[in-house]
Image (cartoon, grey):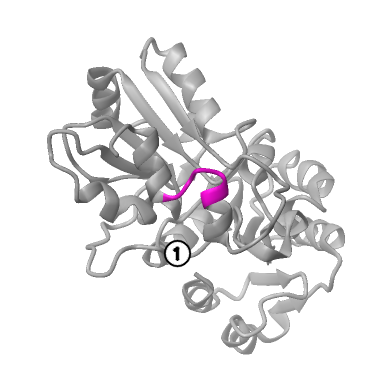
């Protein structure tokens, strides 16, 4: 999604009050943005805590400030600065973390981001955006740029099947329709399930939804999805994030609070450490997040 990110930010850079800070990352992707922005493109170096504080100060002075790093360096290292300097002051700093979830695969747990939006959404005045497809990025940048509070954008790898007609971006979208139970996937994982679910007979084909904005308090369930959950009495949530602080746990509380009762099957990132490391797809399989594991969890194979 980095190319789409660069294109969207280049288009937005016509605003002379926009500034972009990077933690010495974005090589082989963001050069067009650097050329467009000139001195407003700032390489803050490998100093993420300072970068966040500088971004907060610039925003306080009236700049539209964007911050970029790989996902774990974007939120984990500078968490105190995000908490104290950005969210406590209700400053609309936009933070972009590339490679959410197991995106950096073989680089190991220090480079994985499987607790990112859960941690950040414990803070006030912040929205998390998780685009599912490359085609979503421009709309996400527009929405994050218009947000009154802080924003965290978790970038991944768009994985839509070839020839799949991607619906226009919306915080909630139904990608596959059937008469089976609802399945909700967070972000790019949804694209990996489309073919496997769409090929099933309509009678037991799940209704696949993708959610792209959190928390639920700011982005409630669509009425159609709520009706599907109530009718089925079952729900499966899939996310490349640990269970604690997850979308699944927030959704469970939401359903109980609103008197919607359904058996919840939650598939999530299972571990920071594995005996062996591999690609993102390998680590998804280890966590039971691949399409075959989903079909098994749903009792469809």
Please say if 244 is above or below 28: above
Please check the rendered image and state whether residue 297 is part of the magenta-colored stretch, yes or no: no
Label 1 SS: helix
Q: Is residue 139 visible?
A: yes
Please say if 236 is above or below 186: above
Q: Which of 19 and 196 lies nearest the eye of the viewer?
A: 196
Q: Is residue 64 visible?
A: no
Q: Looking at the image, which residue is at 45% across and 51% down?
A: 187
Majority secondary structure of magenta residues: loop
Residue 290 at what x, y percent from top left? 44, 50
Q: Looking at the image, which residue is at 48% across and 46% down?
A: 289
Q: Which of 28 and 59 lies nearest the eye of the viewer?
A: 28
Q: Looking at the image, which residue is at 63% across and 32% down?
A: 245
Please say if 50 is above or below 13: above
Q: Looking at the image, which residue is at 21% across and 31% down?
A: 180
Residue 142 at what x, y percent from top left? 46, 61
Residue 279 at what x, y percent from top left? 59, 64
Residue range in magenta is 285-290
Image check: 117 left or right of 196?
A: right
Badge 1 local density, few (<14 within 10 Å), some, or many (20+)?
many
Q: Quadrant of the C terminus?
A: top left
Task: Find residue 58 and report its image quarter.
Answer: bottom right
Please say if 282 is above or below 296: below
Image check: 281 left or right of 125?
A: left
Please check the rendered image and state whether residue 288 is part of the magenta-colored stretch, yes or no: yes
Q: Residue furthest bottom?
A: 35
Residue on which disc 1 sits: 137
Residue 176 at what x, y percent from top left? 23, 46
Image check: 26 left or right of 49?
A: left
């Amino acid at each position: 999604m980095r190319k789409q990110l660069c294109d969207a930010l280049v288009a937005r850079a016509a605003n002379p009050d926009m500034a972009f800070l990077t933690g010495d990352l974005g090589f082989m992707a963001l050069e067009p943005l650097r050329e467009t922005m000139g001195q407003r493109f700032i390489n803050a170096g490998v100093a993420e805590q300072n970068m966040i504080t500088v971004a907060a100060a610039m925003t306080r002075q009236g700049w539209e400030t964007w911050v970029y790093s790989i996902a774990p360096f974007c939120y984990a290292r500078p968490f105190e600065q995000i908490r104290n300097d950005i969210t406590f002051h209700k400053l609309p700093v936009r933070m972009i973390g590339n490679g959410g979830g197991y995106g950096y695969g073989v680089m190991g747990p220090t480079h994985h981001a499987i607790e990112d939006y859960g941690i950040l959404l414990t803070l006030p005045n912040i929205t998390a955006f998780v685009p599912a497809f490359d085609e979503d990025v421009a709309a996400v940048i527009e929405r994050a740029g218009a947000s009154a509070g802080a924003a965290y954008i978790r970038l991944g790898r768009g994985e839509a099947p070839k020839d799949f007609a991607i619906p226009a971006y919306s915080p909630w979208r139904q990608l596959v329709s059937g008469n089976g139970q609802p399945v909700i996937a967070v972000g790019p994982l949804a694209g990996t399930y489309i073919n496997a679910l769409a090929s099933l007979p309509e009678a037991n084909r799940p209704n696949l939804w993708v959610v792209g904005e959190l928390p639920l308090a700011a982005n409630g369930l669509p009425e159609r999805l709520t009706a599907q959950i109530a009718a089925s009495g079952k729900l499966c949530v899939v996310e490349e994030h640990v269970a604690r602080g997850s979308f699944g746990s927030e959704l469970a509380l939401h359903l109980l609070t609103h008197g919607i009762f359904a058996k919840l099957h939650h598939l999530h990132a299972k571990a920071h450490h594995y005996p062996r490391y591999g690609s993102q797809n390998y680590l998804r399989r280890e966590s039971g997040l691949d399409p075959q594991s989903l079909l098994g969890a749903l009792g469809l194979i």
